[in-house]
Image (spheres, coloured by chain):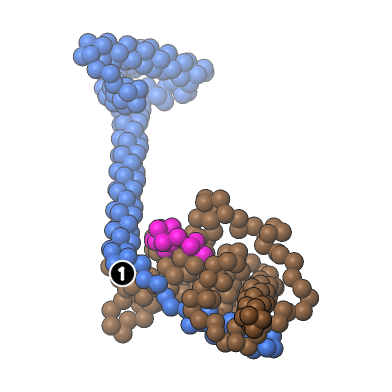
Amino acid sequence: MMMGETETEAIKRCLAGDNDAFAGVVETYQDRIYSFALRLLKDEAAAEDAAQETFVKAFRALSSYNTALPLSSWLFRIAHNSCMDALRVSGRTVSMDHEDFPDLPDRGPAVADSVADALDSERIEALLSSLPPLYSEALLLQYREEMGPAEIARVTGTPEGTVKARLFRAREMLKAKLSDATVQGAEAYYRRGAI
Amino acid sequence: MTADRTDAAIAKAVAALPYRRPRADFKARVMAAIAAEAEAATWREKALRAVGLTVGTWSAAVACGAAAFVYYNFADIAITVIRPGGVSGALNMLAARCALMLAKLISVVSFVIELAGLAMPASYEIVAASLICAAAITALSRGRLAGQSI
C-alpha cells in the first residue's frame, strides 16, 4: 500500500486492475498470516505454502470482499481454510472427535505462581504446539490477534458457543500441562532437599 | 495461584508471541503467482471473446444467407407455401439434398485428408464440412431451381 493509503483504497485499486496495489496488502499481513499458519501446521514449508495460497485466494476473491468487515478477519478466514486443508492433506485430524476433547477435571488444576509467571514465549510456544490445532488456533486468534469470540467464530466458521468452549478447554489444557510442570518441579525440589 | 491469574498469565504470554517472518522472497513469489493468475484470467477472457465473436459472426452469416435466400426466392417460396403439401414436400426435398450433400462433403474431406496423409482431428473435419456446406448453400440459394421457377 502507498503511504497513507487505507486497505480499502488499496483493494479498490486492485479491483480497478492495479495488481501491484496488492503487494502492500501482502507486505502488511505476511508475517501475521505466516506465523498463524506456522503455529498451526508446525512446518515452515507448509506454512509458507498455506500463506501464499491465502494471498492468492484472497486476490482471486477480492470482488467478494465486504469492505464493512476488517480485512484481517477475512484474510484469517482464508488462512484458516488453507491450514485446515493442509492438515487434512497431511492426515492430521481437525475433526471434533474424542482426541480433541480430552477429559478434564471439573475444577481447574492448581498452577504454581512461579510456573505461571515464568511463562515466556518459548515455553508458551511449546505448550501451544502440544495442543490440537483447533485449540491453539482459538487461543492465538483471541490473544495474539486480539479477536473476540464473535470474530473468531466468523474466521473459523463455527458457532460462537463452540469458540467459547474451545477457548475454555484450551486454557484448561494449558493449565493441566502447567500443573504437571508444577508437580515435576516440586518433586525435583524435594529430591534435592532429601539429598 | 488463582485460575484468573493463570488465565491472565497465559493471555499475556500468547499476546507476546513474536511474529515469524517468511523467507525474504515470499512477497515476490506471491506476486508472481498472482501475476500468473491474472494472465491466465486475461487469456480466458480473450478465448471467450474469440469464441463469442466466432459464434456471433457465424450466426450473422447464417442469418444473412437465409434472408438472402428468402429475398431472392420469395416468389417460389410463396407458391410452395400456398400449394397444399408444398411445405412438407419442400422440407423433405431440402432434407434429402442436405443429407446427400453432407455425405458427399464428408467423403470428399475424408478423401482429401487421406490424400494429404494428414491425421486431422474430427473437430477439423466438422469445421471444414460446415464451411463447405455453408458455401454450397449460399451458392445454391442464389440460383433458382428449374422446378421452382415461375
Which chain is rendered blue in the image?
B
Snapshot quadrant of residue B8: bottom right
B1 in magenta: no
- Provide residue B110's location: percent of width, then percent of height: 30, 13
Magenta stretch: helix, strand or loop mostly: helix
- Residue appearing at x 60%, y 55% in the figure: A93
Between B5 and A161, the residue placed more toward the observer is: B5
Between A193 and A78, the residue placed more toward the observer is: A193
- Provide residue A83's location: percent of width, then percent of height: 50, 60
Q: Amino acid at mark 1?
A: Ala
Q: Look at the numbered disc 1 and give the secondary structure of its residue.
A: helix
Q: Colour of chain A?
A: brown
User: Which chain contains the residue that carries disc 1?
Assistant: A
- Provide residue A33's location: percent of width, then percent of height: 44, 69
Between B72 and A31, the residue placed more toward the observer is: A31
- Magenta stretch bounds: A40-53
Q: Is residue B8 visible?
A: no
Give the labeled residue for mark 1: A23
Is residue B23 depicted above or below B67 in this figure?
below
